[in-house]
Amino acid sequence: MIFQVVSRLKSTFCTALFAVSLLVYAATLQAADHQLVDRVVAVVNQEAITQSELDELFYSVREQLSEAYQGSELKEKLLDARKKLLSQLIEDRLVLQEARKRGVEVSDQEVEGRLEDFKKQLPPGQSFDDMLEHQGLDGKAVKQRIHDQLMMQKLQYVEIQRKIVVSPVEIEKFYKDNTARFVAKEKLKVWTIVIPKSEDAVRKGMMDETAKKKAETILEELKKGADFSELAKRESHDSHAQEGGLIGFVARGDMIKEIEDVLFSLPENGRSEIVETEGAYHIFKIAERAPEKGLSLDEVRSQIHDILYRDKANARFEAWMEELKKSAFISIR
């Protein structure tokens, strides 16, 4: 599903999009304050959802899809995404209206606390006020957005989360029925030396003769008995260099296929030849092999609890949303 977030039960005022485009949405609220003429795409109990609301939230989704698809497939994916987003906006509006009707309270301190959490995610050196000014946003609109989200989360807790119980018996049964699902993949302890290509070579998709010759020289030193970690500290250009090139344990699926195929074909304590990728030349060394193994119930108990909890929460949300929709007026334009 396009709008997927771990903590999201089903729909919490577009929680998935809130995580990535809170300030973009604030621009929509600001535009509404300026009373710009806008087309209504849906009405929920006499409250309008506008085209600009949908477009602003749809922007990041459209960008992601455009990178992954083209042509008619992209068009189909965009249409499907738009329908899902509009449906979610409608559900979100229903939940917010219900929260207001029930008088759910959110304090200024709670809003400020959530805002501070958001500010901590900003890049180093960038202030919240500078970002608002750069994007032409209104701080009050952002705070209102946070206030509304907190209202909805509180109502969701009362209607959904607080009513869910996952018993030990359910966890044990799920484990027995899905034992094959809980397997630790084969892992390797990996070290690397990385010699990056020049920007020009990367841009043109070409070989970098200078970088390749340097990698070849390092490989010859290793073959003569040089210490891998010492060479990595001295010659490697990546974030693992200071640790002697140690990446740590790597499982199947953690690396790109061209590297994974090399790593898992090496014998224990083996070393690779030079591996070329788009941006660099790599030399790898592996040590310990941790074979694939089944995980015990105790090792996955918490994971199974989360799976069952999420499934029950989604089911309860669906049922609750159906009840809200039955008593609501919803018109899609």
Image (cartoon, helix red, strand yellow):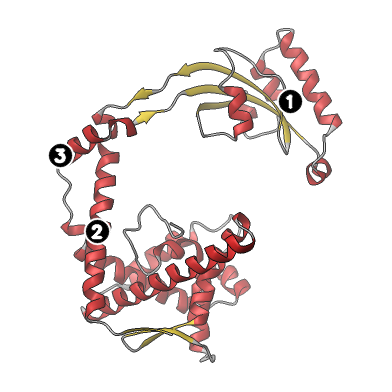
- The mark nearer the N terminus, 1 or 3, is 3
Give the quarter of the image for residue 144.
bottom left
| Viewer-nearest residue: 256 or 228 | 256
**Snapshot quadrant of residue 65:** bottom right
User: Which image quarter is the N terminus in?
Assistant: bottom left
Q: Residue 72: x, y in percent?
A: 61, 63
Cα–Cα gap, marks 2 and 1: 55 Å
Label located before the other in sequence (2 or 1): 1
Name the spot of residue 57 as percent of width and height, x first: 50, 71
Between residue 170 and residue 149, name the one nearer to us. Answer: 170
Would you call the spot at circle 1 few (<14 residues within 10 Å), some (14-19), or many (20 or more)? some
At label 2, which amino acid type do we have? Ala
Residue bearing mark 3: 168
Residue sitting at 66 percent across and 19 percent down? 272
Q: Residue at x 81, y 30 (%)?
A: 211
The answer to whether 95 appears left or right of 66 in the picture is left
Please give the residue where the numbered disc 2 appears in the rendered image: 315
Q: Is residue 84 left or right of residue 166?
A: right
Mark-to-mark CA distance, 1 and 3:
53 Å
Pointer 1: what residue? 235
* Foreground label between 3 and 2: 2
Q: Which of the pair 90/197 is nearer the observer?
A: 90
On screen, residue 256 versus residue 30, left or right, reads: right
Query: Which structural element holds mark 2?
Result: helix
Residue depicted at x 18% and y 58%: 162
